[in-house]
Image: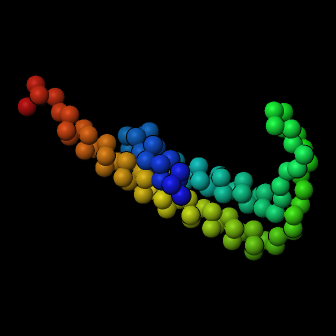
Amino acid sequence: MTAAYLFGKHFSSVYKQQWKNYLTIVGLIGGFAIVVWANYGTHVEDTYPLYGGGREVVDFEPTDKERNEHALKIFLALTIPALVGVYKGKERSERSLDEHEDPFNR
């Protein structure tokens, strides 16, 4: 959750229009939730650290309801702190712009 907050805070200055920052964060986390949804109940064994590989092992066969609930939990648990991070990062960037005004533009 802390990583999601810091990720959102970092992305607060990517676009000048804040709504684009919010949509970018929701889209990226939504994509991550889809990957989690697709791989729920499996893991990879016998991988070589440098070259990857291995075989996918099915731990259990989740129902659609279990898979959807898990992905939704991940999505909400990461989206809320990330959006707060975007908001706080926006405040910080606006404050730093106000503090560093050009003295010749008064």
Residue plotted at (36% across, 52% down): 88
Q: Nearer the viewer, residue 44 or 102?
A: 44
Q: Nearer the viewer, residue 10 or 23?
A: 10
Q: Is residue 47 left or right of residue 6?
A: right
User: Within the image, what quadrant is residue 13 found in?
Assistant: top left
Q: Is residue 76 left or right of residue 49?
A: left
Q: Nearer the viewer, residue 101 or 18?
A: 101
Residue plotted at (73% across, 60% down): 37
Residue 101 locus on image (x, y percent): 17, 33
Residue 30 locus on image (x, y percent): 61, 55
Residue 91 locus on image (x, y percent): 31, 49
65 relative to 23, above or below: below
Residue plotted at (82% across, 70% down): 62
Q: Is residue 31 left or right of residue 43?
A: left
From this viewpoint, which residue is outermost toward the left? 106
103 relative to 12, above or below: above
User: Within the image, what quadrant is residue 14 found in?
Assistant: top left
Residue plotted at (69% across, 68% down): 70
Is residue 37 visible to us here? yes
Q: Is residue 50 left or right of residue 22?
A: right
On the rendered image, what quadrant is the C terminus found in? top left
